Image (cartoon, helix red, strand yellow):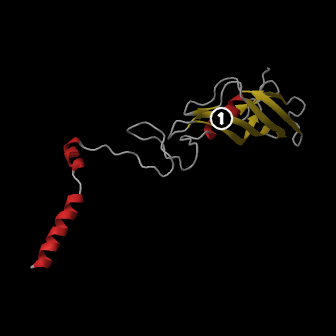
Amino acid sequence: MSGPFVFPAHDIVRRPGEMREFEVSVPAPAKWGEGLVAVAAGEPIELDVRLESVHEGILVTADIRTRYAGVCGRCLTDIAAPVEVEFQELFGYPGQEANDFELQDDHVDLETPVRDSIVLSLPFQPVCQPDCPGLDPTTGEKLTAGAEPETPIDPRWAALQAYTTDHDDEAQSHVVDNTEKS
């Protein structure tokens, strides 16, 4: 068994208390994530892995660091950000109670738990900044901070756009002037 996410445990199998540590950088074998952001194929994944022999199997603890890229869920601007996640899984000895993962040929294959941990930590609605105003629904242009989207005018009210209150002030002043003369 081989691969970039496969770690040997043959020297600590069934030796409770024994431990091995690994630091590796592995390229993502495929695009991980299906939403607005994902970890691209080939993106470096930094792993700090600790294998500990326990009575039930090999306990794996991993700290993972990588980077995701995609688009903002509000304004569709390109974004990229770091991902840091950790997990702990027990790889049980074959024939033991039901485990999610099983030790195979004295090796642990971490591709599935690493991928699952990264994908589950990706933001569902990523934003370029916490207060991203998004896009104007009419023009499709990116709004600036504090800008209000243009509200389309109902065509039934369009004729009133020409109406101004300037002549109301003049009419009001004539009324006042006429009452003073009386």
Where residue 156 sits, quadrant-wise, is top left
Name which residue lies at 87% across and 37% down.
21
**Secondary element type, mark 1:** strand
In the image, what residue type sits under mark 1? Tyr
Q: Residue furthest left?
A: 182
Image position of 146 with respect to 72: above or below? below
Horizontal relation, residue 74 to residue 51: left or right: left
Q: Which quarter shows the C terminus?
A: bottom left
Q: Which quarter shows the N terminus?
A: top right
Using the rendered image of the protein, determine whether residue 30 is visible from the camera's viewpoint.
yes
Horizontal relation, residue 141 to residue 179: left or right: right
Image position of 19 with respect to 94: above or below? below
Q: Circle 1 is placed at which residue position? A: 68
Percent across and percent down for residue 61 are 78, 41
Image position of 82 with respect to 130: above or below? above
Name which residue lies at 83% across and 39% down.
50
